[in-house]
Amino acid sequence: MASIYHFTKRVYGSFNPSEVSKSSDAIRFGMLGAANIGPMAFIIPAKTHPDVIVAAVAARDLKKAEAYAKKHGIPVVHKSYQDLLDDPSLDAVYIPLPNGLHYEWALKAIQAGKHVLLEKPSTSNAEEAKSLFRHPLLSQPNAPVLLEAFHFRFHPAWQTFLSTFDSTDIVDASAEQFLPAGFFPDSDIRFNYALSGGTLMDFGTYAISSIRQAFRKEPISIAEASHRPMPKSRDKEIDHAIKAKWNFPNGGVGRIEADLAARGGYRLPWLTKSWPKLALPKLTVQLSEKEVLDPKHKRHTMQRTVVFWNMIGPHLYHRIDIVDKHSIRNIDNGGLIESWSETSYMKVYEWPEKGNGKVGEAWWTTYRHQLEEFINRIKRREGSGVWIDGEDSIKQMEMIDATYLKAGLPLRPTSNYLGSAG
Ligand SMILES: NC(=O)C1=CN([C@@H]2O[C@H](COP(=O)(O)OP(=O)(O)OC[C@H]3O[C@@H](n4cnc5c(N)ncnc54)[C@H](OP(=O)(O)O)[C@@H]3O)[C@@H](O)[C@H]2O)C=CC1
Ligand SMILES: O=C1OC[C@@H](O)[C@H](O)[C@H]1O
C-alpha cells in the first residue's frame, strides 16, 4: 500500500510539479521544433528550475509553433529555427529535432553563441560527431556548453547501480529494450532513413550507452550484429530491431537487443506470438566468480549478477536486483556440494547522501537531474559530478557506426552542412 502511495506521489510530482519563481540571471532557452518529447524532457523539468526560462519556440509551421507556445506558456514564437538562433535575448537552445538535423542545428546554435542541450543520439554518425564536438568554437574561452541528452545517466539510481560492481569483473553485460509493435506508426521519424532513423539510433542508443557505462571502456571489436528490416515498401536501410555483441578489453562480452516494434514473449506462443510485446527495459551484468574466504569450507565461491529494471526511466519505477550465487565445491574433484543464492533489492529515487552538488527530490525525473547539471556547467557550479563530455559522445557514435556496418546496413547519412558552412 505504501509503495502504491509513493509511486502515485512520485509520478504525479514528475508530471505536475509546482512552478518555482525564476532568478534574475536565469538562462533563457529557445526550443527548435514543437516536438512531442519537448514537454516531458524539457518544458516540465524547466518549471522547477529557478535558473531556467523557456522563453521561445520555433517550428517549421508558424501556426503549429503558436499553438505549442500557447499550450505550454512559451511567451515568444519565432518564424524559423534560424530566427530563433538570431534572437540575442536567448542564451541557450534545446534541440529535439529528428536525428538527421541534430548536427546542422547544434552547430548553427554554437556558431550563434548559444549553449546547446541536444537530444540523443547527438548526430547521425561519428564523422558528424567529431566535427561537432571537436569544433574549434568549443575550445575558445567561455565556449558554449554542449551536452548530448543521455538523461538516464544523471539519475541517482544509475550512479548507484554503477557502484554495485567493479567493471573489470564483468563477464557478460546485456541490455534489452523493447517497445510494443504499433507504439510508433510506420511514418514516424524513427523509421525514416533520410532523417537518420533506425532502432539502433533510438532505443538502441540507450542500450549501447548503458553497456559502455557498465564496462567504463570502449569495446575492442564487434563480434556480431544483425537486424530485422522494416516490412517491404518501407526504407530498406532501417532496422526495425537490432541485436549486437561486442568484445571488451577485460575479456567480457557486451550485448544489446532493441526492438521498436516488438511482438510475442508470452506464454502459449502459438496464440500470442503476434501480440505486441510489453517489457521493461533491462540491463543485466554478470560478474566473474570469486573465491570467498570461508574458514569452514575449503572451496567457497560467489558469483554476482546485477539486474537493473527500467534503467532509462528510473524516476517512474525501477528496481536493482543484486543476486549473489554461492557455491561450495569438493576440493579434490571440484564437484558441487552445495549452492544457494542471496538476493537484495535496491530502489534509489534520491541521492543516498545529499550535499556537495547532489540535490533533488524523489519525484525529480532523469530529465530534471540532467537539466540541473547542464545549468551547473553553464554557471560553473560544482554539481553532482555526472557529465557526458564530447569525446564520450563521439565514442558512442563510433560504436553505432560499427554496429550498422556489421549488420550490413549503411551508416546514417551525413548532413550537407558538414563541409559547407560547418
Ligand atoms: N530523451 C528522450 O527521452 C527522448 C528523446 N527523443 C529524441 O528527440 C528527438 C525528437 O523526437 P520526437 O519528439 O519523438 O519527434 P517528433 O516527431 O515530435 O519530431 C520533432 C520535431 O522535428 C521537427 N522536424 C523538422 N524537420 C522534420 C521533418 N522533415 N520531418 C518530421 N519532423 C521534422 C518537427 O518540428 P516542427 O515542430 O518544426 O515541425 C518536430 O516537432 C529525436 O532525436 C529523438 O531521438 C525522443 C523521445 C524521447
Ligand atoms: O526514451 C525514449 O523512449 C521512446 C523512444 O522512442 C525515444 O526516442 C526514447 O528516447
Image: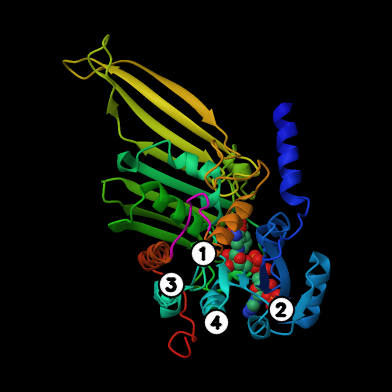
Amino acid marked by disc 4: Lys
- The residue nearer to you, when weighing 337 against 127, is 127
Residue 373 image point, x, y percent:
55, 56
In the picture of the structure, the residue carrying the numbered disc 1 is 148
* Span highlighted in magenta in the image: 381-389
Q: Amino acid at mark 3?
A: Phe
In the rendering, which numbered label is found on residue 128?
none
Q: Contact (CB < 8 A) between labels 3 and 2?
A: no
- Of mark 1 and mark 3, the one earlier in the sequence is 3
Of helix, strand and loop, which one carries label 4?
helix
Provide the residue designation for mark 4: 108
- Does dot 1 land on a helix, a strand or a loop? strand
User: Label 1 neighbourhood size at 10 Å, few (<14), some (14-19), many (20+)?
Assistant: many
Residue corresponding to mark 3:
133
How many callouts does the rendering have?
Answer: 4
The image shows residue 393 at horizontal and vertical percentages of: 43, 64
Is the CB–ligand 1 distance for label 4 below 8 Å? Answer: no
Q: Which residue is mark 2?
A: 59
Q: Hey, which residue is sitting farthest left in the picture?
A: 332
Report helix, strand or loop for mark 3. helix
Q: Is 101 above or below relative to 43?
A: below
Mark closer to the observer (3, 2) = 3
Query: Residue 109: x, y in percent?
Result: 57, 79
* Label 1 CB sits under 8 Å from any ligand 1 atom: no
Q: Nearer the viewer, residue 120 or 405?
A: 120
- Please state which of the two labelled residues, at mark 2 or mark 1, is closer to the viewer: 1
Q: Is mark 2 within 8 Å of ligand 1?
A: yes
Amino acid type at circle 1 is Glu
